[in-house]
Amino acid sequence: MATLRAWLLMGEGKTVEFKVELPWTNQLARTVCAFANRAGGVVCLGVDDNGQVVGLSDEQVTDYLERIPNILYDSLSPMLLP
């Protein structure tokens, strides 16, 4: 939880990206690829551009946990481990 607070206080930047919902497949893959080519990074889902936590429904969490690895597996080479 302390790490999430730090990311929220730091705001978006070269290693932190906020998204209210899961972005389109190619946008997510590009963001993760950019982080992988730098020093890493984090995409915070359920957070608006101002760093306010808006949350995700249980259904969204379940869906995202299944979809994100598949999106990255299908879109990036070499394969990354999210």
Image (cartoon, rainbow, N blue to C red):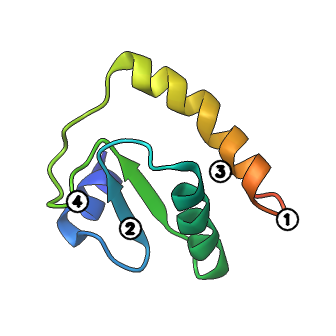
Q: Earlier in the sequence, mark 3 or mark 2?
A: 2
Image quadrant in which the N terminus is located: top left
Label 4 sits on residue: 8
Q: How far apart are marks 4 and 3 (CA)?
A: 20 Å
Label 1 sits on residue: 78
Amino acid at pointer 1: Pro
Do residues under tags 3 and 2 come within 8 Å of each other at their CB atoms? no
Amino acid at pointer 3: Pro
Q: Tag 1, which secondary structure?
A: loop
Residue at 45% across, 49% down: 23
Label 3 sits on residue: 82
Tell us which disc is closer to us: 3 or 1: 1
- The image shows residue 73 at horizontal and vertical percentages of 77, 48
Answer with the quarter of the image where residue 15 lies.
Answer: bottom left
Amino acid at pointer 2: Val
Residue at 23% across, 55% down: 5
Label 2 sits on residue: 16
31 left or right, relative to 77: left
Tell us which disc is closer to us: 1 or 2: 1
Q: Which of marks 1 and 4 is nearer the N terminus?
A: 4
Amino acid at pointer 4: Leu
Q: How far apart are marks 2 and 4 (CA)?
A: 9 Å
